[in-house]
Amino acid sequence: MSPGCLKIITNYLENNFMHKLHYCSLIIIILFSCACGNSKSTPGHSDTAATQTSTTPQPANTKTILFFGDSLTAGYGLDDPQSEAFPALVQAKIDSAKLSYKVINGGLSGETSAGGKGRIDWLLKQKVDIFILELGANDGLRGIPTTETAQNLQTIIDKVKAKYPDAKLILTGMMVPPNMGADYATAFKKIFPALAQKNKMAFVPFLLQNVAGIKELNQADGIHPTAKGAKIVANNVWAVLKGEI
């Protein structure tokens, strides 16, 4: 091979190698930048929308309780939702009673009944022994027709029944502020006991009993409970749940 040809080949290999090296380095920089940019989540929202709240080691035969709801379940606005949201407080009661149940917090801030209908299939990929449905508040605040809310909630219930026919079901009742209008408020309130009776579900008459409307138990928005308020909400739920365990 002539010296000229050898030089051409050598230059090509060197240039091609440096090009590939530059390209690989660029990819690494981009990937690293993306990883850093996603390190923080939006306040009040859950990246996974499902968080296991128990920190106690669970035996192999542990059963699962899925709380499926909106910001009230997610613990919006609390300093530490993983320990202060009412599902986490229910888990603490379960652990204290030495019961083999783990709580999954499937709350998502801003969730409506329509959104829940589209999200439930993903959460039902894990085994569910007790299903607690807490949705509808955002529908009420938006003035969504009560017939639509009721149908969406029924669809969610039907999906749970179809996937886990032996699961125990609990529904939490909700109300809307008086400024939504007396007729709407009355119709909205009736959604929940009607669904509970139709589906033979255990029923929490009003999730925010002894919390709603009490300033010191609510955050500045007057809607979401403080840590102290969340403890009362947990007691409201536990009063019904303990009879199903």
Image (cartoon, helix red, strand yellow):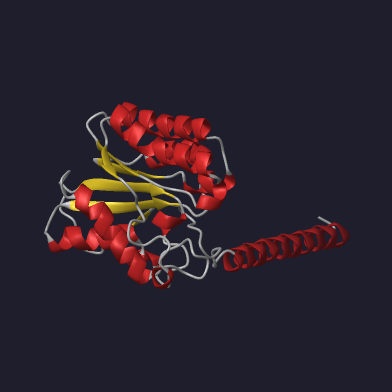
Outermost residue toward the left?
Answer: 98
Q: Position of residue 101 (x, y in %)?
A: 19, 51
Q: Residue at x 51, y 43 (%)?
A: 182
Instruction: Identify whether 152 is placed above or below 33.
Output: above
Q: Quadrant of residue 12?
A: bottom right
Q: Position of residue 76 (x, y in %)?
A: 46, 62
Decide which of 82, 193 is in the foreground and name it. Answer: 193
Quadrant where the N terminus sits is bottom right
- In this rendering, position of residue 103 left or right of residue 149: left
Q: Is residue 201 visible?
A: yes
Left or right: residue 92 versus residue 117 is left
Question: In the depicted view, which residue is nearer to us: 33 or 154?
Answer: 154
**Position in image of residue 40 (x %, y %):** 55, 67
Q: Residue at x 50, y 36 (%)?
A: 118
Residue pushed farthest right? 4
Q: Residue at 20% across / 53% down in the picture? A: 239
Q: In the rendered view, does 201 fall on the left or right side of 38? A: left
Q: Is residue 54 visible in this depiction of the protein? A: no
Image check: 104 left or right of 43? left
Query: Looking at this view, is 114 or 138 the one in front?
Result: 138
Residue 23 location (% of width, % of height): 72, 61
Whether residue 34 is situated above or below residue 242 in the rendered picture = below
